[in-house]
Amino acid sequence: MKVYLYVDGASWHKGERVQRFLNAHANIELEHLPPYHPELNPQERVWHLIRYEVTTNQYHATVDQIAQAIRERQKHWKTKKIKRLCTVT
């Protein structure tokens, strides 16, 4: 069975270790997303919404406070919301 893995253009998706892994797993094929198309990358939508919900009109004195606020907010997200964000049409 062939597995197609869609990745963005990050350098860690293109390195020698990735090539060695792909050579060892012939059934996996990487497909690179076109550059500058965050709408094709579902985690970009998740990141955008969490930033909006956590940081809009909010003050966090430290990075740790931001991380904690993100974790607390995500606890209240329903599965339906995450699926909607991650659906590529």
Image: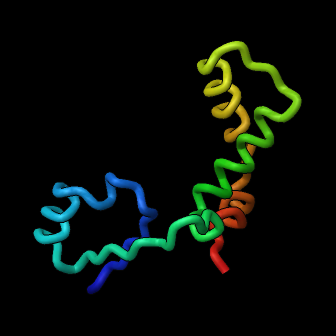
Q: Position of residue 52 (x, y in %)?
A: 79, 42
Look at the picture and state if 80 lies above or below 47: below
Query: Which residue is farthest top?
Result: 61
Residue 51 relative to residue 22: left or right: right
Q: Position of residue 59 (x, y in %)?
A: 80, 20
Question: Which color scheme did the rendering employ for the protein?
Answer: rainbow
Quadrant of residue 23 within the rendered picture: bottom left
Placement of the N terminus among the 4 image quadrants: bottom left
Placement of the C terminus among the 4 image quadrants: bottom right
Residue 57 relative to residue 15: left or right: right
Q: Residue at x 84, y 35 (%)?
A: 56
Query: Which residue is farthest front?
Result: 36
Look at the picture and state if 78 lies above or below 65: below
Q: Residue at x 11, y 69 (%)?
A: 24
Query: Which residue is farthest right?
Result: 57
Q: Residue at x 36, y 78 (%)?
A: 4
Q: Residue at x 65, y 67 (%)?
A: 39
Query: 30 or 70, which lies in front?
Result: 30
Quadrant of residue 81 within the rendered picture: bottom right
Residue 26 relative to residue 82: left or right: left
Q: Position of residue 32 (x, y in %)?
A: 41, 72
**Total numbered badges shown on the rendered structure:** 0
Look at the picture and state if 81 lies above or below 47: below
